[in-house]
Amino acid sequence: MKLTRSVYYRFVLIGGFVLLLELLCRSGVIDRLTMQPPTDMVRDLVLLLISGKMNAAMLKTFVNVAVASGLAVIAGIALGVALHGWHAARQVLEPLFATYYAIPIYAFYPLLIIMFGLGDVPQVLTGFMLAVVAVIVNTLNGLDRVSRVLMKTARVYRLGPIATALKVTLPSAAPYLLTGVRLAVAYAFIGVIGAEFIMSRTGIGYEISFAYNNFDNRVMYPLILLILITSIALNAALSHWERVIARRRSRS
Amino acid sequence: MNAQGWRLALNALVLIVSLLLAWEALFAVVGSQAMTSPLATFRYLAQLLATPTFWDHVEETSRAFFFALAIAILSGLAIGFLLGAHRLSGDIFEPVLVSFYSIPKITLYPIILLAFGLSLPAKIAFGAIHGVVPIAIFTMTAVRNLNQILLKTARVLRLKPGKIIVSVLLPAALPEVFTGLRLGFALTLIGTLLGEMFGSQRGLGYLLMTAIGLQNVPLIMAITLLIVLFAASVSTVLIVVDHRLHRRMP
């Protein structure tokens, strides 16, 4: 089978790359100040996780990501449904959505710090701002594709607007909403970690930049590894779920 | 201008006016401690643009952005064409590219700084790794989904390989590739600015970082406005071209 063959090659290539990195680090071609050998990173990460030193920072980051993406999903779907019904407003906002991701949202972070102080709010808001438009756009996209027959059926059954949204339109648009959710989680993660990295007092992003400023590679590399593993795993899980739903949809 | 053009222009005008009104309203709520009003910000920006030292920072950022974009475009196109033309490599690397797209690349910045040092190359590298992925993904998809009939026709006409690339492959893949370039442009800009915010002594990102340290609200607002204006206007032009290219294709 072709798919399994490509998966196999992918693992071999990634494994080979890690092995190469290990050899280059161990042989001293890449010095210890620049990069730690991958096996050391994994060992230090395990030790760091067991020691519990990072628990508070991890909790902070994960809670902020969850709050930012949760708010983005709720607000994004609500706004998407509202704009789908209000054609004039949608026409005006369409160019904003199209250019939104060209604007560096981090540029607003300094303003948010001045407005709200150095607490959690600026970080959550940065993640939220980065995530919400992706949810709106995907919600609109999904609602545009709900088939007319379904809407007519809802009218025949005399469902009210809220019942129609909950029982017909939203379930029918579910695959697109899920794409919005996946992007929301990824963008909220990027937003929160980035904000922590730029300026904050807690969180994994802050710990990475703190370790970097102290040349503490034995903390920095394991934490970078932790972020990479978490975001790749989250993304893979959500896209797997997305594919399962899409497959079920195409079968029925 | 036709009726549709007028309607689009009107919509854009309504959007800009409502954004300015929202800004003014927010200013009225949070007060002058936290932000400056639209008028004051534009005036401060005009003042900044009249000072030569500010242009040094703009020039530094532009230079870093230019090189980063050039690297992102060239390597993105090369990777995309290779992975698109060779099915197995495409299958192997596509998930890797997609995962790379979704990770917070800011965490990789310390590694880049350690590798390149505190200098222009670090900013360029950081901008480029942001921009290269969408360009590669879109180019790969475009080449993969090329209509096979086009290639067969080219072979029947006995075109030389160079001629096939220039007059068949490129025009056919152009609309999708352009979408990738548009996204790559935006992400490279973000990457370059982020790169300047840490470990840099010059550039708009550096200026923004020092302004936070000094709590210089007018400066923060003016730089943010300049960046947003630049990103939004270039991206609007690119979107118009993008739509044209897509409409031209059957």
Image (cartoon, rainbow, N blue to C red):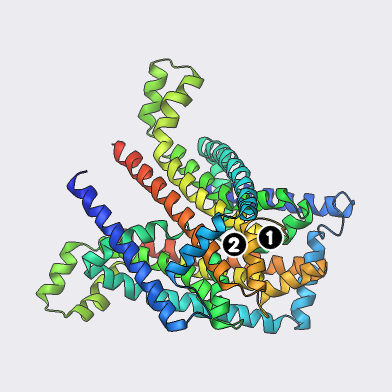
Under circle 2, the secondary element is loop
Under circle 1, the secondary element is helix
Q: Amino acid at mark 2?
A: Ile
Tell me where residue B187 sits by quadrant: bottom right
> Residue B143, position in %: x, y?
46, 37
Q: Chain of mark 2?
A: B
Check the image and report above or below for B6 versus A210: above
Q: Do the CB atoms of the residues marked 2 and 1 lie less than 8 Å apart?
A: yes
Residue at (63, 60) in percent of width and height: B205
Number of other residues with Cα within 10 Å of mark 1, as a class: few under 14, some 14 to 19, many 20 or more: some
Give the spatial CA distance, label 2 vs label 1: 9 Å
Left or right of A45, for residue B151: left
Q: Chain of mark 1?
A: B
Which residue is disc 1 drawn over? B108
Return the disc, 2 or 1, that comes first in the chain's sequence.
Answer: 2
- Whether residue A1 is visible to the viewer of this picture, yes or no, is no
- Whether residue B166 is visible to the viewer of this picture, yes or no, is yes
